Amino acid sequence: MRVRVATTALGITAALLAMPACSTGAKPDTASSARTGKPTDATQKVVLLSSAALETRLLDESDLGSGYLRKPERPARHDDITVVGCPALSELGGDAATGGTLTFPRKAKATFTYAGSTSEVSEELYSDSANKLSDGIGRIFDAMTGCPQYQVVVGGTPIDMASQKLPVPHGLGDEQWSQLLTFSAGGRSTVVKQTAIRAGSLLLIVSGSPALVDRHLDKALAKATATS
């Protein structure tokens, strides 16, 4: 299946082409993850946040600490993407194969580099009804982790993909998803961790270097869900 999609912060395949190899000393946990909790009852009042309000809830350099620099947003790229070896992702479209492109209108995002290196951490926030958020991110995670190995061809460049479910961060939010992605192309490999947490009508996604995701996930959720 060939589709034309916009590569965004959540669609992280393009990042592989600009990043050097990254390896971890520990073998990823093979325990499967699963969605926990249930979407908010439809009878409850849904409070949605505007994109401007979400922007104020993103982490900034002062939250992250020394050594972090925010990257300027780049214009969306439109690449032809072909999915090979994963029918579930083919059915959803090429955007899902690269981490997915969520189309919720209320959104904000930021990406930071660390200590002048190529290590990055990206945060995205979305606001919509609990059911819509749960369904949107859940379908993408289920499809991606349902195919342990597949290939995508982005603008003519073949990229070998490996996906693996990770234990979810219990106790955070209402629902959680987590996975480890390995992108391999041209003799280089990049490992990216992606964790999503839904808290009511807000969805947080933190992606990037596994160590940086683990380091900043809690504070990202705390700031995103702060009521003051």
Image (cartoon, helix red, strand yellow):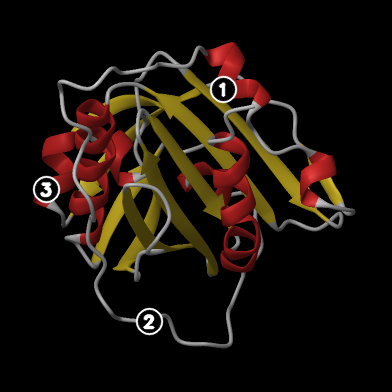
- Image position, residue 144 (x, y; %): 25, 53
73 sits left or right of 136 in the view = right
Give the residue at x 64% y 27%. 228
- Image position, residue 161 (x, y; %): 35, 61
Mark 1 crowdedness (10 Å alpha carbons): few <14, some 14-19, many ≥20: many
- Closer to the chain start, of discs 1 and 3, is 1
- Closer to the chain start, of discs 2 and 3, is 2
Return the residue found at the far bottom: 26
Q: Is residue 1 visible?
A: no
Q: Give, as a three-letter code, the residue at label 3.
A: Ala
Q: Is residue 155 above or below residue 105?
A: below
Q: CA distance from mark 1 to mark 3?
A: 31 Å
Give the residue at x 17% y 60%. 146
Q: Are marks 1 and 3 in contact (CB under 8 Å)?
A: no
Q: Nearer the viewer, residue 96 or 44?
A: 44
Q: Which residue is mark 2?
A: 29
Quarter of image, res 59: top right
- Image position, residue 111 (x, y; %): 66, 39
Q: Which residue is mark 3?
A: 88
Mark 3 crowdedness (10 Å alpha carbons): few <14, some 14-19, many ≥20: some
Q: Nearer the viewer, residue 158 or 150?
A: 150
- Image position, residue 21 (x, y; %): 62, 69
* Local secondary structure at mark 3: helix
Q: Which residue is mark 1?
A: 54
